[in-house]
Image (cartoon, rainbow, N blue to C red):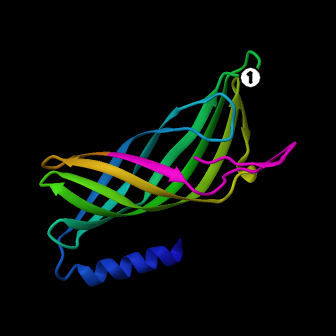
Amino acid sequence: MRKALIILTALFLATTSYAQVRFGLKAGGNLANMDGFDKTKMKLGLSAGPALQVKLANVLFLQTELLYSIKGTRSDSMQNANAKLDLNYINLPILIGYRLAPNFSIKLGPEIGRLLSAKSEIDGNTTDITDFYQSFDFGADLGLAYSFKKIALDLRYNYGFKDLLERANGNGQEETKM
């Protein structure tokens, strides 16, 4: 992650002499779920952090963010118990954007995430399960954005490529992806 930040900083320093640079703050909600668990439901989480956008050409831009994100899942399939999984991450998406119209753009790129903590809550009893999860996550983002004067509406889908948790089952390993 440190190498990515160094490369990104060098790229921004090289392009700021002729490119338009915009800084901002991003805050919003997310819906997360995990593959690999039975009968899970989407869980509402939050994301917030700084964002940077560099205009590369008339319709092309580079955008990166450093986001604190709360992800996870929930389930009520356990016998008379409600379960919730909270995963807290620092995420670094690096996106290439293409302006389809003056206020409308599409974005695509990789995202790396660093797990800060993982907690499981079953009927009010909370357990730290950080050690059972991978420290890093890697995925791809695809999104659409509509920009107003000072605010943008950004709708994005993230698919995780890496197994977050490996559990032994009767057939070997079961994958879990966000």
Give the image location of residue 41, x and y in percent.
Answer: 57, 29
Query: Residue shown at 34%/80% (left/top)?
Result: 11
Give the image location of residue 122, x and y in percent.
Answer: 71, 27
Give the image location of residue 154, x and y in percent.
Answer: 30, 46
Look at the image and give the residue range highlighted in magenta.
Answer: 155-178
Left-right relation of 59 to 80: left
Residue type, numbered disc 1: Met
User: Tag 1's secondary structure?
Assistant: loop
Magenta stretch: includes residue 92: no
Q: Is residue 55 above or below residue 16?
A: above
Q: Find residue 77 and report its image quarter.
A: top right
Q: Which residue is mark 1?
A: 78
Magenta stretch: includes residue 163: yes
Query: Residue shown at 52%/44% (left/top)?
Result: 70
Query: Residue shown at 53%/71% (left/top)?
Result: 1
Nearer to us in this view, 11 or 119: 11
Give the image location of residue 131, x and y in percent.
Answer: 75, 53
Q: Using a 10 Å C-alpha cutoff, classify the residue at mark 1 as few (fewer than 14 neighbours), some (14 to 19) or many (20 or more).
A: few
